[in-house]
Image (tube, rainbow, N blue to C red):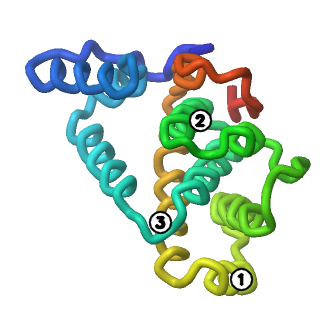
């Protein structure tokens, strides 16, 4: 992590805290700084984690497309934590890491298929303030993916906006997950509002 959070991480204590730390170490190899920040309001932490767990179980849309969309949101918003964590997750899910590395500069990269480019553009359009999604974007994705997958993709992008914007606002930055699994340096976008 390159900076300090805007709300200092609380000490994660008690039986529930011990369980959370053990789970984090087992699944991630460390206890993320974000857990300490969100520990100040445990209901928020638990509800966000619960929702995130449910999002991960959705299966109408291709996992790689959803992962790339989340990374595009993280890159656009400047959430180094989400980008780093999603590289780690993409590695663990055996997704295309050459493409994952290129997400922050996808427009200049030749690595992506036309569909992947449409998904990345859609993620960015949803992330704009005001959103710039067009009827044509959605119609093209519906033709290629089907209605259920587009609804799921849209919800994943909305969830990515929910988490990335909160992390940026609280000053939560990368915890080095990608480095922990031996990945070479990845493309990065400078955090917004540093």
Tell me the CA gap for discs 3 and 2.
20 Å
Mark 1 Cα-neighbour bin, 10 Å: few <14, some 14–19, many ≥20? few
Helix, strand or loop at disc 2? helix
Residue pointed to by mark 1:
140
Tell me the CA gap for discs 1 and 2.
27 Å
Q: Is residue 26 above or below residue 114?
A: above
Q: Position of residue 152 (x, y in %)?
A: 47, 69
Residue pointed to by mark 3:
155
Which residue lies at the image location 53% right of the left edge and 68% below the top edge?
Answer: 154
Q: Position of residue 114 (x, y in %)?
A: 80, 67
Q: Earlier in the sequence, mark 3 or mark 2?
A: 2
Quadrant of the rendering where the N terminus is positioned:
top right
Q: Is residue 184 above or below residue 49?
A: above
Q: In the picture provided, is 8 more to the left or to the right than 117?
A: left
Which residue lies at the image location 69% right of the left edge and 31% below the top edge?
Answer: 191
Q: Nearer the viewer, residue 18 or 148?
A: 148
Q: Is residue 49 visible?
A: yes
Q: Is residue 190 above or below residue 30?
A: below
Q: In the picture provided, is 161 more to the left or to the right than 9?
A: right
Residue pointed to by mark 2:
87
Q: Earlier in the sequence, mark 1 or mark 2?
A: 2
Label pair 3/1, CB-CB below 8 angstroms: no
Helix, strand or loop at disc 3? helix
């Amino acid at each position: 992590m390159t900076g300090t959070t805007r709300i200092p991480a609380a000490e994660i204590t008690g039986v529930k805290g011990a369980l959370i730390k053990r789970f984090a170490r087992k699944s991630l190899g460390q206890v993320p700084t974000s857990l300490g920040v969100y520990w100040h309001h445990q209901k928020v932490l638990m509800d966000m984690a619960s929702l995130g767990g449910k999002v991960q179980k959705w299966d109408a849309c291709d996992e790689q497309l959803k992962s790339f969309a989340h990374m595009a949101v993280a890159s656009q918003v400047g959430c180094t934590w989400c980008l780093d964590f999603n590289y780690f997750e993409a590695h663990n899910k055996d997704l295309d890491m050459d493409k994952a590395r290129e997400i922050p500069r996808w427009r200049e990269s030749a690595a992506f298929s036309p569909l992947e480019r449409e998904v990345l553009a859609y993620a960015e359009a949803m992330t704009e303030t005001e959103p710039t999604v067009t009827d044509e974007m959605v119609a093209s994705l519906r033709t290629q993916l089907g209605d259920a997958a587009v609804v799921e993709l849209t919800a994943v992008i909305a969830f990515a906006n929910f988490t990335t914007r909160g992390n940026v606002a609280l000053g939560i930055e990368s915890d080095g997950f990608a480095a922990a699994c031996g990945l070479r340096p990845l493309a990065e976008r400078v955090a917004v509002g540093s």
